[in-house]
Amino acid sequence: MILEHVVNCINEVYEDVVNSPSVDIQKWVYKLQEMMDQDDTQMIMKKAIMNAMTLCLSQGIIDDDFFESTLLHNFEFIAKKVPEMKKSMLLKIELEGLEKQIYRTMKVPYGIILADLAYLILASMNAEGSHLFSLSINGQNQYGCDACDEEFIDDYAADVTIPELHIEKGDQIELWYDFGDNYYFQIEVLDIEEHEDIQSFDNLEIIKGQGYGIWEDEHQFLDMYYHDREEFIRTIEDYGLSEDDFIFEDFDLDASNEMIIEDFEFLKMAYETPEEIDM
């Protein structure tokens, strides 16, 4: 019920903005409409309105002039970002050491936060998000998750976007997951594609893949399973385990695409709520 009131409020403010007598506001409304289709324009404008309202309320300033100034600043910022938001990246993701057995080819929006890219990759590999991670671009810098010690990283992955890093075709991204079990995902940017419309998570697509994904806390067993099945069986029996304790499902393209957003949202919530992370 409360959320419904908030949505109704945003919709009412949106109508007021679209019909505003302000010449400056109308200039930006027309500019945004020229750059995007109707649905994207409405979505972007409502986000700008929410940001402007949040700033006003957080500072306790209930003033139309301040709101308009903040809104115009948001419109200008968004307009500069629109060209990058119309791009997507085609990625080849491979698990180091098992490149032929476990990989994904995936199309993701270009204009996203770097941390969201990590969540998408981990979700595609069936990771549970119970460990820390960091990313590096072309072997440079380390961008960690929110729970990483800031002394050991250059920045937080949630504080930078793909466009800010100027990622291009041919770049190499490494995602290091679980600093104890050491899962390394090597990501190659196969292409940067341009589109007429803004690319969102609705355009996300896993194109092909191989292998179920990773086994949490069992990297050694996963390697052994693919490299020497007989040794794998002997070793897990020595540990008092059986094959029933492991997941041997094949990669399912349709199921992966169906679950990717739900799994992404689960990981994003887990990582951005630090107390839930297993250090």
Image (cartoon, rainbow, N blue to C red):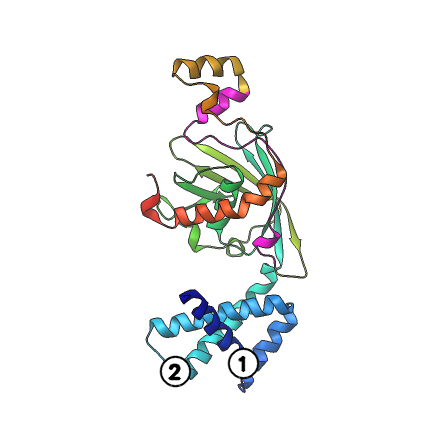
Could you say which disc has been placed on residue 25 in the image? 1
How far across and how far down the image is residue 184, in percent?
A: 48, 34
Label 1 crowd (10 A; few <14 / some 14-19 / many >=20): some
Relative height, residue 143 to residue 27 (above, below): above
Give the CA distance from mark 1 to mark 2: 16 Å
Indicate the amino acid at tag 2.
Answer: Asp
Q: Nearer the viewer, residue 202 or 7?
A: 7
Residue at the location (52% across, 12% down)?
230
Q: Which residues are magenta?
A: 199-226
Instruction: Check disc 2 and report its element: helix, strand or loop.
Output: loop
Relative height, residue 115 to residue 85 (above, below): above
Residue at the location (42% across, 14% down)?
237
Report if residue 154 is visible in the image. no
How far across and how far down the image is residue 123, in percent?
A: 50, 42
Q: Nearer the viewer, residue 247 or 35?
A: 247
Label 2 crowd (10 A; few <14 / some 14-19 / many >=20): few
Residue at the location (43% across, 65% down)?
3
